[in-house]
Image (cartoon, rainbow, N blue to C red):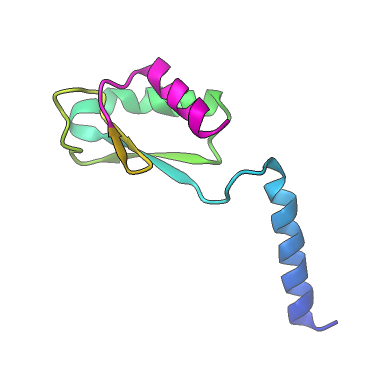
Amino acid sequence: MGKRLQIFLGSLLFLFWVSGTGRAFAVETLSICRPCSRDFIPVAERVIEEMGLTAEISVKATSCLGACATPAVIEFRDTIYGDMDEARLRTMLEAAFP
């Protein structure tokens, strides 16, 4: 067997082993509006860690998301959410990652 084929098959086997959770490989981003919601960043990070989703979601502070009248403001999967709190975030993530 050629060296390239061995490397390819080894990589493929590794990917199948890693993907045993059945979840996507890509890490999704939870963006949090820094100007109005910076206090929510540690809350979101804690919720993600408690739910065991640190390999699936990264938290990123962004510039204004345009909904500062309803903090905490986040963007997830191309949707902006206002009035976010810990309970709403947990519910949203439970639905997104059953």
- In screen coordinates, is 54 left or right of 40? right
Asked if residue 65 is positioned above or below residue 73 in the image, the reply reads: below
Where is the C terminus found, in terms of image quarters? top right
The quarter in which the N terminus is drawn is bottom right
Q: Residue furthest top?
A: 87
Q: Quadrant of residue 81?
A: top left
Picture residue at 34% right of the left edge, 18% below the top: 85
Q: Which residues are magenta?
A: 81-98
Residue lying at 75% horizontally and 51% vertically, measured from the top left: 17
Q: Position of residue 82 (x, y in %)?
A: 25, 26
Q: Is 93 a magenta residue?
A: yes
Q: Quadrant of residue 12?
A: bottom right
Q: Residue furthest bottom?
A: 2
- What residue is at 57 percent from the left and 48 percent from the top? 24
Give left or right: position of 44 versus 18: left
Magenta: main secondary structure equals helix
From the top left corner, tell me how far across and down residue 29 is, in percent.
Answer: 40, 43
Residue 47 lies in the magenta stretch = no
The image quadrant of residue 10 is bottom right
Left or right, residue 14 beside residue 68 = right
- Residue for point 77% across, 69% down: 9
| Rendering coords of residue 45 (x, y %) | 43, 29
